[in-house]
Image (cartoon, rainbow, N blue to C red):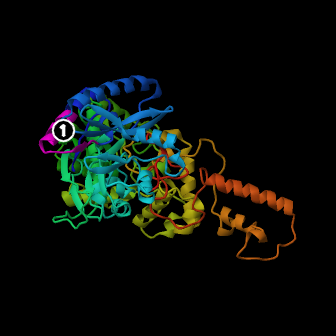
């Protein structure tokens, strides 16, 4: 069969304009003899569902759009949509062929329920006969796992990715990270052609990078679309082929900082367009984060659409900031140096600077940007007044910003060396004595934070894996303390990790604080210590005299807590080694964030 992927950028819910563009893609595909054209998940409905109060009207207009498309499409198409099943927003894929509309996932679920097969296979995944091939449709990593593990008879698996780009999940970059991601193993495990369909652009605050691809069952790369660009990818798939390909493509080497820079640049540009902002304005204070933010805004929007307020009480920092503006070719009349009398490094001066930034954004009709990063938002109290409408770096650690700055300077040396040499490290008791350099201190701080937030390791797990138990406890404790101040979340941030800082905050006012526990005090060890001789079939031994009823009650209680921990609340690792892919929005875990697909994102 000849397959095509329409890697296109749209605006969620803009049904009329999007339908016209989809019909155009279908005509172009039909001219190339395509048997099936596949669209990305975000094409019509975006990445997140509308509010419940708007759902009825949205679904009705979506249905009208699909009915009109069925008459306009020049070739068979597979179109992902968000539907509602039992009051829950659920993804589906509509196979439209000659005016007929087949909701392949919903039909499969109903067939599985009526046939009683749900207990044998996970609610039934699609197996659709089309154009001489059997097609499977997957929306999540868990769906891919099921196609890998169960006896599904499919020739092609269409992975309609709903995962935005995440720095800590290489698979979210799709074809640009095949060597580091999971899809080569999926193709081998299923014995099927693996087709990754990637959206592009910024939807809500998630950024999608495209890079759709087609893999042969034996792991060779057949075709790949570019990252961050619209494209119509067309290739032939032969279910009977056994390889090797005559001219396979060579998978590219994954460059995580480069992809991250492209993602946040795209996110900033799309956000300004969505808000109809004329440009962006920001404060430059001589710090690395503000210099990098000015560079990002210039790359995304062009220097003519960037406004800078230089706020640097130190004259040297002010000169560096002004030199940065000249290097970026920002017009001179777009650069203003703030002269603030009085205590220039105090809360009042910073508050006045934020107020001036807000006034500039209002006067020029532009978007005010903040330079806060994930490390600072987690561990440092900031000014009460914050004019920023967006923090492009708010989901990136400070160590990531250093890597991005070095990357950007390899493209063109715009960030002054004086700025690159400045590494701001949060003040944590004991940190200076444990590490000899600022880079080492910051690297450890960010490692602890990412282990706790993205990988969802408990404090005891972090101490066991990373050492420096007291320091790790101090970092997590500081994060908890700062999390009790709601203003720390500030302006929204582009989502470029598998779990944001806001999703990791404990309930406000929670008095309980975790502590580092030795292995013998962990839940699993305590359960093992209470196992009776009869239960230790491989280690028979005499039970010491004790209160058997009390021990039985304790064992039952701890067993209940263990079972409860598998579904939420406690770390599932019990001191095990850290494994890539544990926790986060892109994973299945006890605290993974719910998504519009089907509850927690599944395990990678």
Q: Is residue 150 above or below residue 30?
A: below
Residue 398 position by quadrant: bottom left
Q: Residue 63 at x, y = what percent?
A: 34, 27
Q: Is residue 168 above or below residue 483?
A: below
Q: Residue 416 at x, y = what percent?
A: 24, 57
- Is residue 33 inside the magenta stretch? yes
Q: Is residue 231 left or right of residue 554?
A: left
Judged from this view, the residue extending furthest toward the left is: 31
Q: Residue at x 42, y 67 (%)?
A: 440
Q: Is residue 193 left or right of residue 425?
A: left
Residue 547 position by quadrant: bottom right
Q: Is residue 521 above or below residue 113?
A: below
Which of the two residues, 308 or 240, is positioned nearer the viewer here?
Answer: 240
Q: Residue 420 at x, y = what percent?
A: 30, 59
Q: Residue at x 23, y 44 (%)?
A: 36
In the structure shown, which secondary structural element does the residue marked by tag 1 occupy? helix
Q: Residue at x 46, y 41 (%)?
A: 111
Which of the two residues, 344 or 277, is positioned nearer the viewer here?
Answer: 277
- Is residue 431 inside the magenta stretch? no
Q: Residue 211 at x, y = what percent?
A: 26, 52
Q: Is residue 184 left or right of residue 379?
A: left
* Residue that badge 1 annotates: 25
Per the rendered image, the range of residues in magenta is 21-39
Rendered-image quadrant of the C terminus = bottom left
Binning the other alpha carbons within 10 Å of mark 1 as few (below 14), some (14 to 19) or many (20 upward) gives: many
Q: Residue at x 29, y 32 (%)?
A: 100
Is residue 297 visible in the rendered image? The answer is yes
The number of callouts visible is 1
Which of the two residues, 107 or 78, is positioned nearer the viewer here?
Answer: 107
Is residue 419 visible in the rendered image? The answer is no
Q: Is residue 60 above or below residue 578?
A: above
């Amino acid at each position: 069969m000849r397959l095509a992927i329409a890697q296109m950028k749209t605006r969620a819910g803009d049904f009329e304009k999007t339908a016209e563009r989809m019909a155009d893609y279908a005509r172009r595909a039909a001219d190339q003899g395509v048997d099936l054209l596949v669209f990305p998940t975000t094409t019509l409905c975006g990445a997140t569902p509308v509010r419940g109060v708007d759902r009825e009207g949205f679904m009705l207009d979506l249905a009208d759009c699909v009915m009109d498309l069925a008459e306009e499409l020049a070739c068979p198409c597979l179109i992902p949509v968000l539907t509602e099943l039992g009051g829950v927003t659920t993804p589906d894929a509509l196979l439209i062929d000659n005016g007929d509309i087949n909701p392949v996932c919903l039909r499969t679920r109903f067939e599985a329920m009526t046939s009683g097969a749900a207990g044998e296979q996970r609610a039934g995944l699609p197996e659709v006969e089309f154009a001489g091939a059997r097609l499977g449709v997957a929306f999540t990593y868990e769906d891919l796992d099921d196609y890998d593990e169960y006896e599904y008879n499919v020739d092609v698996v269409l992975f309609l990715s709903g995962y935005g780009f995440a720095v800590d999940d290489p698979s979210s970059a799709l074809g640009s990270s095949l060597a580091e991601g999971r899809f080569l193993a999926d193709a081998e495990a299923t014995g099927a052609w693996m087709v990754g369909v990637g959206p592009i652009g910024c939807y809500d605050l998630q950024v999608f990078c495209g890079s759709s691809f087609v893999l042969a069952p034996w792991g060779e790369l057949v075709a790949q679309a570019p990252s961050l660009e619209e494209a119509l990818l067309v290739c032939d798939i032969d279910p009977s082929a056994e390889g090797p390909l005559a001219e396979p493509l060579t998978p590219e080497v994954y460059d995580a900082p480069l992809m991250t820079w492209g993602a946040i640049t795209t996110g900033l540009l799309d956000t300004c367009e969505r808000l109809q902002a004329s440009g962006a304005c920001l404060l430059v204070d001589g710090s690395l984060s503000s210099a990098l933010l000015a560079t990002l805004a210039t790359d995304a929007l062009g220097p003519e659409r960037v406004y800078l307020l230089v706020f640097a009480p130190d004259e040297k920092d002010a000169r560096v900031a002004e030199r940065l503006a000249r290097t970026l070719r920002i017009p001179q009349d777009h650069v203003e140096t703030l002269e603030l009398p009085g205590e220039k490094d105090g809360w009042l001066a910073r508050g006045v600077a934020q107020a001036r930034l807000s006034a500039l954004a209002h006067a020029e009709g532009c978007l005010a940007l903040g330079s806060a990063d994930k490390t600072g938002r987690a561990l440092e109290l900031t000014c009460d007044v914050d004019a920023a409408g967006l923090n492009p770096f708010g989901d990136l650690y400070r160590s990531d910003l250093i890597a991005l700055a070095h990357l950007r300077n390899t493209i063109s040396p715009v960030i002054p060396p004086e700025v690159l040499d400045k590494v701001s490290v949060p003040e944590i008791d004991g940190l200076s004595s444990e590490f000899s350099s600022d880079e080492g201190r910051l690297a450890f701080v960010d490692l602890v934070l990412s282990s706790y937030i993205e990988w969802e390791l408990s404090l005891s797990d972090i101490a066991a894996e990373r050492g420096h138990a007291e320091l790790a406890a101090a970092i997590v404790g500081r994060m908890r303390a700062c999390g009790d101040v709601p203003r720390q979340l500030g302006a929204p941030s582009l989502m470029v990790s598998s779990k944001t800082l806001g999703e990791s905050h404990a309930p406000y006012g929670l008095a309980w604080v975790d502590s580092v526990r030795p292995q013998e005090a962990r839940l699993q060890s305590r359960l093992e210590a209470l196992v009776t001789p009869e239960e230790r079939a491989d280690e028979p031994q005499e039970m010491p005299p004790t209160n058997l009823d009390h021990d039985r009650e304790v064992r039952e209680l701890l067993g209940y807590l263990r079972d409860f921990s598998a579904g939420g609340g406690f770390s599932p690792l019990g001191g095990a080694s850290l494994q890539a892919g544990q926790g986060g929005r892109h994973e299945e875990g006890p605290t993974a964030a719910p998504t519009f697909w089907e509850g927690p994102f599944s395990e990678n």
